[in-house]
Image (cartoon, grey):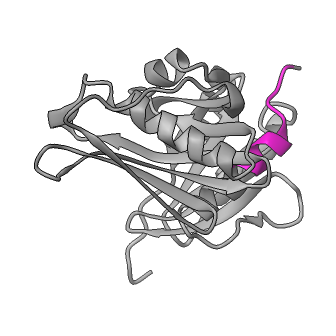
């Protein structure tokens, strides 16, 4: 059966937690079905990431049942090459499927195209430890676009890529991704990893990023704070 490799998911997740300064994700019990991350966001206290949804659908059923019964509001993220089967499983467990078509994407950062921001925008690059943040500032100094990338070994995980609505369609996304890729390669990274929103997929595809799998996200029942 075609599947996304669990090691690729692990690599992305490790970098994602580094990018967001979160604790390292921990295994869900001892089955190897998935990894659990303490996100600490209101309404998204915990997120579980499925590792073997395609190769062993029963593993996803176990994860979905655990998310449905969790004592904290928990999300379930599933990279998959079989989205219809995943949707059926998580819906059967009583989870709310968030209808966002996200993609797991990779690229060779050493071949990433370079695009400088057009005037009057200025690019600012700040690196603290393994995380680099690139900001593009408009003529009044406002932040027009921002993104981060975390370097873990030869991998670089891009995260929270955003362009302000007032500054879209001006090539800022391309300039920002170029800055992130350049900074990551300078730190020894070679492979870029990210999960792309539906809005970002066209941008990343145009820059040479490759679709590896779909990503489905579901949410367990909301848990009252005093539960």
Instruction: Give the side of residue 22 with respect to residue 145, left or right.
Output: right
Vertical comparison of 32 with 8: above or below? below
Instruction: Give the side of residue 6 with respect to residue 225, left or right.
Output: right
Image quarter in which the C terminus is found: bottom left
**Residue at 45% across, 22% down:** 203
Residue stretch rendered in magenta on the structure:
2-12
Was residue 66 drawn as part of the magenta stretch in this picture? no
Residue 17 seen = yes
Front position in the image: 102 or 121: 121
Image quarter in which the N terminus is found: top right
**Residue at 28% across, 43% down:** 122
Which percent across, then down, holds residue 124? 37, 52
Which percent across, then down, holds residue 35? 74, 58
Was residue 3 drawn as part of the magenta stretch in this picture? yes
Front position in the image: 151 or 115: 115
- Disc tally is 0
Which percent across, then down, holds residue 147? 43, 48
Main secondary structure along the magenta-highlighted residues: helix
Which residue is situated farthest in the left direction here?
140
**Residue at 41% across, 62% down:** 222
Which residue is situated farthest in the bottom direction here?
226
Instruction: Give the side of residue 49 with respect to residue 166, left or right.
Output: right
Front position in the image: 65 or 197: 197
**Residue at 52% across, 43% down:** 180
Which percent across, then down, holds residue 209? 61, 23
Say which quarter of the image contains residue 17.
bottom right
Residue 69 seen = no
């Amino acid at each position: 059966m075609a599947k996304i490799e669990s090691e690729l998911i692990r690599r992305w997740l490790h970098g994602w937690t580094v990018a967001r300064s979160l604790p390292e994700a921990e295994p869900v019990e001892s089955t190897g079905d998935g990894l659990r991350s303490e996100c600490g966001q209101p309404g998204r206290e915990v997120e579980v990431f499925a590792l073997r949804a395609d190769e062993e659908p029963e593993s996803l059923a176990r994860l979905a049942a655990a998310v449905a019964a969790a004592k904290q509001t928990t999300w379930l993220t599933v990279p998959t090459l079989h989205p219809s089967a995943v949707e059926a499983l998580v819906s059967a467990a009583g989870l709310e499927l968030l209808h966002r078509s996200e993609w797991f994407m990779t690229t060779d950062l050493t071949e990433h195209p370079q695009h400088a921001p057009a005037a009057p925008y200025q690019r600012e690059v700040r690196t603290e430890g393994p995380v680099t943040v690139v900001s593009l500032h408009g003529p009044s100094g406002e932040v027009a676009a921002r993104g981060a990338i975390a370097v873990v070994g030869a991998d670089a995980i891009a995260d929270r890529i955003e362009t302000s609505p007032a500054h879209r369609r001006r090539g800022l996304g391309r300039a920002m991704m170029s800055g992130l890729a350049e900074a990551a390669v300078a730190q020894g990274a070679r492979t870029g990893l990210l999960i792309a929103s539906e809005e970002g997929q066209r941008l990343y595809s145009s820059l040479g990023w490759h679709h590896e799998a779909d990503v489905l996200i579901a949410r367990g029942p909301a848990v009252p704070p005093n539960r």
